[in-house]
Amino acid sequence: RVIGEKMPNASGAECKAVCTEAGIFALRERRIHVTQEDFEMAVSKVMKKDSDTNMSVRKLWK
């Protein structure tokens, strides 16, 4: 729920990407459990990509 509140209007694909990224963060540190911090870092990474992509599309339409 906490993670979902940080991702308003996120698509299912974005939610999946966050889960995948959180798992990758844990694996990089050789952990078998994903932490809240992993999810928070993943949200920042995935939502930043989405924001950057939206900005690029807006520039193309101008």
Image (cartoon, rainbow, N blue to C red):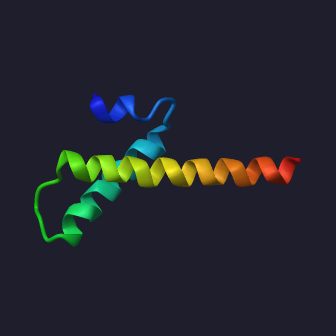
The quarter holding residue 33 reads: bottom left
Q: In this view, does 22 lie above or below 11?
A: below
Q: In the rendered picture of this protein, how many numbered marks are placed on residues?
A: 0
> Which residue is found at the position 17% from the left and 50% from the top?
35
Q: Is residue 4 above or below residue 55?
A: above
Give percent across and percent down for residue 48: 52, 51
> Which residue is found at the position 59% from the left and 47% from the top?
51
> Which residue is found at the position 83% from the left and 54% from the top?
60
Give percent across and percent down for residue 4: 36, 32
In this picture, residue 12 sits left or right of residue 2: right
Give percent across and percent down for residue 1: 28, 28
Give percent across and percent down for residue 10: 49, 36
Q: Is residue 50 above or below residue 10?
A: below
Q: Residue furthest left?
A: 32
The quarter holding residue 3 reads: top left
- Residue 37 vs residue 28, the one in the foreground: 37
